[in-house]
Amino acid sequence: MDIFLTLPFWYQVTMVAVLGAIIGSFLNVVIYRFNTGRSLSGHSHCLSCGQQLTWYELIPVLSWLVQCGLCRHCGCGVTVRYLLVEASTSFLFVLAFLNIPFGLPLLVSLVLVSLLMVITAYDIAHLIIPDKLVWLTLLGALLWFWSVDLFSSETELWLYHLLGAVFAGGSYGALWLLSGGRWLGFGDVKLAVPLGLVLGASSTFSFIVLSFWVGAGVSLVLIMFQWFKVSRGKTRLPSSLKQLTMKSEVPFAPFIIIAFLLVFFWDVNVLQLVTFGW
């Protein structure tokens, strides 16, 4: 670790970005094969023609761009999800590197954002958050406590973060009950608990409000994409995001996770934003 820190800063950032893209490539395999009973160690292949892919067809980000999102063998489109997951994971790794102390806290945060990336993509594709991923996120939240030395005898500190978990789960749970599950799923309620645990009580308020702001903004953009038919051709949107209207069911976990990351990395405070706006 000490040797890494002696390298030029631009080189450190580049290496972290490359690592993130490589991990993102692995996460794509996890997303595709999760809950299918298939091993994560099998060879990658084209989902259209079944042709096994070579190493130069599996270079994160670059292979998709060079091949214009097409299979070299059959010419069929390769979902843009692969590119987005790899690029987004790379971006989040750099973001964590720039904002989290180097060492164990950074390592745990990288694991946590990787889990959240899998949940985001899986929820977009299937409109469900598997319990296994929620439990792993809870484990990641607890590891975060351990890595930043929050496992202490300070009762007030523990209560502060436990209140964050209760507040997050209770708030989303109330909305789930009031809407009969139409506004968000119960998986979103369960996911909010470990995220609230990480943030603590006061930051959780901003996290909850931001999730709805982000949800409204992203939903409007996606509806515009539908109107302008941006999803046509070989880089179409996932099936869960097709034919969107204001009454469509959309995955809510991505909005929760984006809001969490905004508060986690930048400590965004909605009250300050509203006050500044006035």
Image (cartoon, rainbow, N blue to C red):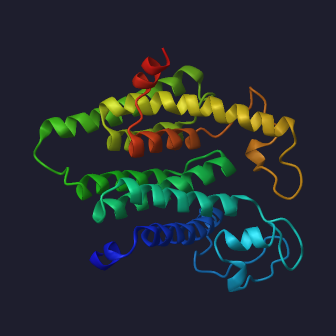
Q: Position of residue 181 (x, y in %)?
A: 59, 29
Q: Position of residue 113 (x, y in %)?
A: 46, 55
Q: Nearer the viewer, residue 139 or 85?
A: 85
Q: Nearer the viewer, residue 191 or 259?
A: 259
Residue appearing at x 84%, y 78% in the figure: 72
Quarter residue 43 falls in: bottom right
Residue appearing at x 84%, y 45% in the figure: 230
Q: Would you say 57 lies left or right of 89 here?
A: right
Asked whether residue 172 appears in the rendered view, the answer is no
When the figure is inspected, residue 89 is found, relative to residue 193, above or below; the finding is: below
When the figure is inspected, residue 195 is found, relative to residue 101, above or below; the finding is: above
Q: Nearer the viewer, residue 112 or 5?
A: 5
Residue farthest toward the top in the current orientation of the protein: 278
Residue appearing at x 83%, y 73% in the figure: 71
Q: Would you say 48 lies left or right of 151 here?
A: right
Quarter residue 26 falls in: bottom right
Asked whether residue 77 appears in the rendered view, the answer is yes
